[in-house]
Image (cartoon, rainbow, N blue to C red):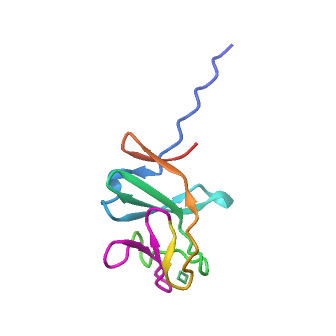
């Protein structure tokens, strides 16, 4: 009887080094109806991930690929109406959706790669 195949380790979303410190990167994950647009922000050796969907009217946040940060680099910013979100918890602290939050995606960093939590 053949041995059962070893399950493949889940693919990382990206390498942490793919994201400049203080910046964020957009990632398309999955395909078909399971396709998701995700953004991953980096702060030192930590990664914070959210669905790339503004809680105001649901547009993606980036005005051009991988441009997610406010001019001062402190917050994620929605390109549509300028809402500002804290990187660490996704809370909107300024703009038309103030008090609402980006939808978090649970991730962890392991061996220099950003993985979805199992
Ligand atoms: S769609 Fe993001 S602030 Fe309006």
Judged left or right of residue 1, residue 116 is: left
Q: Looking at the picture, how far across and down is residue 76, in whole percent? A: 43, 72
Say above or below: 11 vs 72: above
Q: In which quarter of the image is ligand 1?
A: bottom right
The overriding secondary structure of the stretch rendered in magenta is loop
Q: In this view, does 10 lie to the left or right of 109?
A: right
In the rendered view of the protein, which quadrant contains the N terminus?
A: top right
Residue 40, position as x, y percentages in the image:
45, 60
- In reply to whether residue 88 is colored magenta, the answer given is yes
Per the rendered image, the range of residues in magenta is 68-89
Residue at the image point whose x is 53% and y is 68% from the top: 52
> For residue 43: magenta?
no
The answer to which image quadrant residue 62 occupies is: bottom left
Which residue appears at 35% of the width and 65% of the height? Answer: 23
> Going 30% across and 60% down the picture, which residue do you hit?
20
Image coordinates for residue 65, horizontal then vertical, percent: 42, 71
């Amino acid at each position: 009887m053949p041995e059962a195949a070893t399950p493949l380790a889940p693919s990382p979303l990206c390498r942490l080094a793919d994201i400049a410190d203080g910046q964020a990167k957009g990632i398309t994950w999955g395909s078909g109806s399971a396709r998701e647009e995700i953004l991953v922000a980096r702060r030192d050796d930590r990664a914070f991930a959210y669905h790339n969907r503004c809680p105001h009217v649901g547009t993606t946040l980036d005005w051009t690929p991988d441009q997610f940060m406010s001019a001062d680099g402190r917050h994620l910013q929605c390109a549509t109406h300028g809402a500002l979100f804290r990187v660490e918890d996704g809370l909107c602290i300024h703009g038309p959706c103030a008090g609402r939050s980006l939808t978090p995606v649970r991730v962890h960093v392991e061996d220099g790669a950003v993985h979805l939590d199992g």
